[in-house]
Image (cartoon, helix red, strand yellow):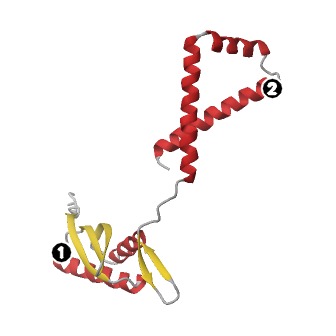
């Protein structure tokens, strides 16, 4: 459910709660019948009030239909890689593989920030990594170690064939200059 739907649901629930309290107060005679008569007379006599009530009822009706159909909407399964085993199928979500790639990358100290994306292919899986490095470790050595770690961990832990691991070094983070002390 997105933010807009949550906001609409909150407003809808709040208005329905107020309406319920109003109906309960009228049924317990906490609100004098004269107020109810005046409100109903305004509804029948004033075109402006009729239009306001009609539009409000129409909005409630449309929102009710939306929530009704949202309740029956099927959630799409998370994209995954299927492995066929002797005892049955095993599905590993792409998010899980991305998490494994991030975990394998964090074993390397020179990696400061990392984003992983998984792309299933016919020959295996391609792992795309976008990294930020410390700027002190040679990048070719760092990326080679990163590719080996990610490939090994995913193949070992998930049992998924990794076709290749691509690395984009997007940033070299600057190390702060040591402050000189002036005495």
Residue that numbered label 2 is attached to = 27
Q: Nearer the viewer, residue 22 or 137?
A: 22
Judged from the image, the secondary structure of the residue bearing numbered disc 2 is helix
Task: Count up the numbered dots.
Answer: 2
Foreground pick, 10 / 121:
121
Decide if residue 84 is on the left or right side of residue 114: right
* Residue designated by label 1: 139
**Disc 1 and disc 2: Cα gap in Å?**
76 Å
- Percent across and percent down for residue 6 are 52, 44
Dot 1 and dot 2 residues touching (CB under 8 Å): no
Q: Residue at x 21, y 64 (%)?
A: 170
Query: Can you say which quadrant of the picture contains the C terminus?
Result: bottom left
Q: Name the side, left or right, on which 163 lies relative to 57.
A: left
Instruction: Give percent across and percent down for residue 2.
Output: 47, 48
Toward the viewer: 63 or 175? 63
| Disc with the residue nearer the chain's start (1 vs 2) | 2
Residue 52 at x, y percent in the picture: 55, 19
Q: Residue furthest right?
A: 28
The crowding category of the residue bearing disc 1, from other C-alpha atoms within 10 Å (few below 14, some 14 to 19, many at least 20), is some
Q: Is residue 44 shown above or below 161?
A: above
Q: Going 23% across and 61% down the picture, which residue do you hit? A: 176
Residue 101 vs residue 124, the one in the foreground: 124
Residue at point 64%, 15% (across, down) = 43
């Amino acid at each position: 459910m997105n933010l807009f739907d949550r906001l609409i649901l909150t407003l809808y629930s709040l208005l329905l709660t107020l309406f319920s309290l109003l109906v309960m107060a009228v049924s317990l005679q906490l609100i004098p019948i004269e107020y109810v008569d005046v409100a109903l007379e305004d509804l029948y006599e004033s075109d402006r009030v009729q239009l306001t009530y009609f539009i409000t009822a129409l909005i409630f009706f449309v929102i009710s239909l939306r929530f009704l159909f949202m309740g029956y909407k099927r959630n799409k399964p998370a994209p995954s890689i299927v492995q066929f085993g002797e005892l049955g199928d095993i599905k590993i979500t792409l998010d899980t593989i991305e998490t494994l790639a991030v975990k394998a990358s964090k074993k390397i100290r020179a990696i400061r920030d990392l984003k992983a994306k998984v792309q299933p292919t016919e020959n295996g899986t391609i792992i795309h990594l976008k990294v930020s490095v410390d700027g002190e470790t040679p990048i070719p050595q760092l990326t080679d170690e990163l590719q080996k770690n990610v490939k090994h961990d995913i193949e070992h832990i998930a049992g998924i064939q990794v076709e290749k691991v691509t690395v984009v070094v997007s940033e070299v983070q600057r190390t702060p200059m040591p402050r000189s002390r002036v005495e």
